[in-house]
Amino acid sequence: MKTSRMLGLVMIAPAAIMILLFFLMPVVLTGVFSMTNMTTATGISGGAYQIAPHSLNDLKSAMPEIAEQMSQPRYTIDEVGLKAVEGLGLDPGIATELRAKHMGEVFPSRREVERMIKGLDQRPSTPDVKKISEQFNRSVVNSRFSSKEELFSVLDTLGFTLTDGQKNSVADVTYTGWNWTTENFSRIVSSPDMARVLFNTLLYVALVLVLFNTTYAMLLAIWTHYMPSAPATIFRSIWLLPRITPVVIYVLMWKWLAWDTGFISVLMGKFGYEPKNYMLDNAYNAWVFVVLINGFIGASMGMLVFSSALKAIPKSQFFASEVDGASRWQQIRYIILPQMRWPILFVTCYQTLSLLASFNEILLSTRGGPGKATEVWSLAAYHTALNNYAGNLEYGLGAAMALVLVVIGIVLSLGYLRIFNYGTLVSRPLIED
Amino acid sequence: MRILLDNFSKSFGATKVIENMTLEVGHGEMLALLGPSGCGKSTTLFAICGIHRPTGGRILFGDRDVTDLPSQARNIGVVFQSYALYPHMTVAENIGFPLKVKGMATADIRKEVDRISGLVHIGNLLGRRPAELSGGQQQRVALARALVRKPDVLLLDEPLANLDAKLRLEMRSEIRRIQRETGITAILVTHDQVEAMSMCDRIAIMKEGEIVQIATPAEMYSDPRTAFVAGFLGNPPITFLRGVMANGVFSIPDSEIRVPLPASVAAAEGAKLMLGVRPEHFTPTGDIAVPGKVMFAETQGRENLYDVRLNGGPLLRSIQPVRHDVNIDDAVTWAIDSRNVLVFDDDGRRL
């Protein structure tokens, strides 16, 4: 018994590793990313420290004086500057005197350094004073440091006197890398754009599910049930085509149908209408196409499930209901539909999950447009994290959006498993091992 | 209500199942369609239901031609072999279904369901679902559903086939009782001759899509028209001896067996004949003694059954009151009751 258990573990190990790598890890990483503010700008590895104008703005409220000082240029008499002065081709005595008398001094403003230069024995002309002072301009604005320590030492040499707390605040605002944060979730909750996307998602799932995945699928199943078997098979196969056609080609055919030189435009042209892109012309049209494109794919699964469930109803029940006097409609209403409860529930559950997660048809057809009219949650997450016009991909926010979807999916799945009484399906076998 | 099948034919594609069959069932009569599987008895029943449309001929209920009417318009009650109860409905809903689809008021349905469930003794089960019923109870529900709308005709398709032996016995008399009480015209399809004989006023015995004989059970047993009919009725079944007409008596070549034939039998000298001997007519008390050896013995409690191999090869079956003096391999000399033998020609036609 023990060895058989061991063997079982060994046999299942490859599958378990696969699950770990390709299912669990992405979820865990999504969770990790969602707690950061990673973007294209921050990169996904560590960042540097840069005293950018916007970081000084951020500092202003906490440390107005220091922010002000940092935004102004500082003048330090250092070797680099002296070398540069020597290269200006002025009286060499100037550089020599500066090195001898003022080496290492820091002046908080241009006025003060120029006053010092004017006071030199070798007094330069006024235009030269400007040239010389410019060589010692050591502004920290827009300078970049690869580590905290470098930032602090430069601040020290430039004569800023900062406490440790202040230093850390400066480091925080000037850091260009990513940080841990829960801001993504508060953004999701508070943003009106997100509310709109959520509404779109619910509309999309509800329309496709109710109109096509269940109702239309049921109609197809019942129609084909009452057809002779040969035409029924043909009819079913036709409705499977959207499912088995590669999705890119399938959607491309819809685009050919709808765009301004496509079938609808040509047809409507005969009646004197201007050609236009019927799919993206307005939000209403876009929704019609999105629902149709997904619905035609989704209907086939329900059709198959319902058809097989219909086949499972014994023929004698149909005979019995006929001799009992039931019309075809009454047969559907009282005999078929009540026995379709579980298949309907199953298809509803399954398709809700797959609709929530799927966006490829929308991406290929409307790209969420026009505007953001057909942007659904998963597509929005994709646009946020992986592909958008602005070019600043917000991995953190996108991951947070994906995580919301994952959580919804897990909660729904657990709920469904409960409804379907999954426990009884996997209960311990009566035969002992 | 009288049922008439007039020149009825049914084929599926190229397969002809029934050809030009004519059958009349009298008002209030219960008729059995009896035959082996594949004989067309269920096809006939389904055509009367309206589930199958006839390919030729007419079907009349009373004077009404229902040939082209759908099942819904025929006012029939059917009990299917599998009962075909609706699993998602309670017993009361199952029974009330034919009335519900007619649009009857709920209170009236309730009243009718109570009446009919009293008749078939299931008044205490109305709240249950079919899955919670035993086979016999399901059978009663199916019967109640078939009868609730007072159909012109009751059709029973192998109604007892799915029951165990004891229940079968019970339901046999129950169905007959209910049919008598309601006075309904009924057709029973079965392959079991005991059911047919015990439940029905008349039996129509079918073979390969044709009715071979229609008669009351007693007539059919004592006066079968063919060897097939004789072989189909009776349990344990009849045995046949093959021989020829020689010097006015039935004789088996290469054996001593000679059986004088009833005066009514007219057969030419030398004609090949089949002699049907029912087990109860081969006993120690007959008039034509034949020696043989007991090959098989079976006790059935009240009676014993023996297979006896006659000298010369043929086998005869005997049923006798229980006795303990005869065992397998014993030599016995029992006798055929020559007044009760059934004589058939070589094709199985009764002479």
Image (cartoon, rainbow, N blue to C red):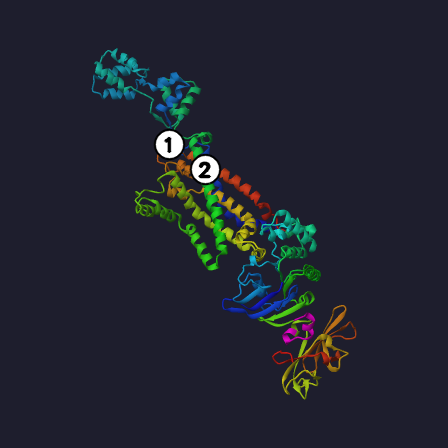
Above or below for B265 versus B194: below
Above or below for A347 versus A382: below
Q: CA distance from mark 1 to mark 2?
A: 20 Å
What amino acid is found at the position of numbered circle 1 in the picture?
Ala
Using the rendered image of the protein, determine whether residue B20 is visible from the camera's viewpoint.
yes
Instruction: Label 2: state its secondary structure.
Output: helix
Q: Horizontal placement of A359 versus B39: left or right?
A: left
Q: Chain of mark 1?
A: A
Q: Is residue A255 magenta?
A: no
Instruction: Label 1: state its secondary structure.
Output: loop
**How far from the left and from the top, in percent, is residue B6?**
56, 68
Residue marked by disc 2: A402
Of discs 1 and 2, which sits in the foreground? 2
- Residue range corresponding to the magenta coloring: B215-229
Above or below for A124 versus A381: above
Residue marked by disc 1: A41
